[in-house]
Image (cartoon, rainbow, N blue to C red):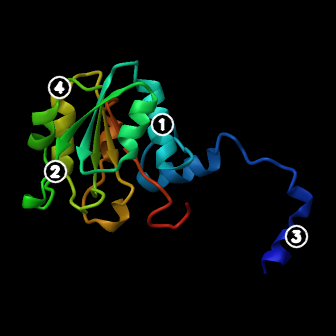
């Protein structure tokens, strides 16, 4: 079947895909109920993390990340000359995530990363807690909610927050639930 599909499309193998991904962007926007302009397609969540670091960080800016957590937040931040601070999630309470835990470690960082569901524990953070964090952080702080495993949890997405806020970004990926890495 694959060979047959290749033969059927040999007249188009010299064509590059659309660089703007407008058709994909429109479908994603429709699925999540947001404007096309609020969707940005990147080469995976890692690519989005890199682009956010590049766009938001000046040398020496600080980034707040969960510990334990996805190591790439810190790696990308350091690569883009940022400094990394951590907020601790504890196994004693099931790695519970809430505004108090994050804000007790917050010191004006330029980016704050939240992971829901959290990797590796699977704990989630409620939408009202995400909103409380965004409300309590400085205007120039970007709160990034990584929902790479969002399809595997029964928790509200933070996507609705991007309609009313410029200080919240939400990451989703095709690689976890859809196996398209």
Camera-nearest residue between 21 and 173: 173
Vertical relation: 51 (above or below) 172: above
In the figure, is residue 40 to the left or right of 157? right
Cα separation, mark 2 vs mark 1, equals: 24 Å
**Residue 18 x %, y %:** 72, 44
Q: Are marks 4 and 3 in contact (CB under 8 Å)?
A: no
Residue of label 2: 89
- Badge nearest the viewer, 3 or 2: 2
- Could you tell me which residue is drawn at 35 percent across and 53 percent down? 147
Secondary element at tag 1 = helix
Mark 3 to mark 2: distance in Å?
Answer: 53 Å
Query: Which residue carries the number 1 mark?
Result: 50
Disc on the earlier residue, 4 or 3:
3
Taking 178 as reference, is 42 above or below it? above
Q: Which residue is mark 4?
A: 107
Pick the quarter of the image with the N terminus: bottom right
Q: Are marks 1 and 3 in contact (CB under 8 Å)?
A: no
> Picture coordinates of residue 136 (x, y %)?
15, 30
Q: Position of residue 50 (x, y in %)?
A: 48, 36
- The span from disc 4 to disc 3 (Cα, nearest Å) is 58 Å
Residue that numbered label 3 is attached to: 8
Mark 3 or mark 2, earlier in chain: 3
Viewer-nearest of discs 4 and 3: 4
Separation (CA) of disc 1 from disc 3: 37 Å
Q: Position of residue 44 (x, y in %)?
A: 52, 50
Give 9 or 181, whichever is nearer the viewer. 181
């Amino acid at each position: 079947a694959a060979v047959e599909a290749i033969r059927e499309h040999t007249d188009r193998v010299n064509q590059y895909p659309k660089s703007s991904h407008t058709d994909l962007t429109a479908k994603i926007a429709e699925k999540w109920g947001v404007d096309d302009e609020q969707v940005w397609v990147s080469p995976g969540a890692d690519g989005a993390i890199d682009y956010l670091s590049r766009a938001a960080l000046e040398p020496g800016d600080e980034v707040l990340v969960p510990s334990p957590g996805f190591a790439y937040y810190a790696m990308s931040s350091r690569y883009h000359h940022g400094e990394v601070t951590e907020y601790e999630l504890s196994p004693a309470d099931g790695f519970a995530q809430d505004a108090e835990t994050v804000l007790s470690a917050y010191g004006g960082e330029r980016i704050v990363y939240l992971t829901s569901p959290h990797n590796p524990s699977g704990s989630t953070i409620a939408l009202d807690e995400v909103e409380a964090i965004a409300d309590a952080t400085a205007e120039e702080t970007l709160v990034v909610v990584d929902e790479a495993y969002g399809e595997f949890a029964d928790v509200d997405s933070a996507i609705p927050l991007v309609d009313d806020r410029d200080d919240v970004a939400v990451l989703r990926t095709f690689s976890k639930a859809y196996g398209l890495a």
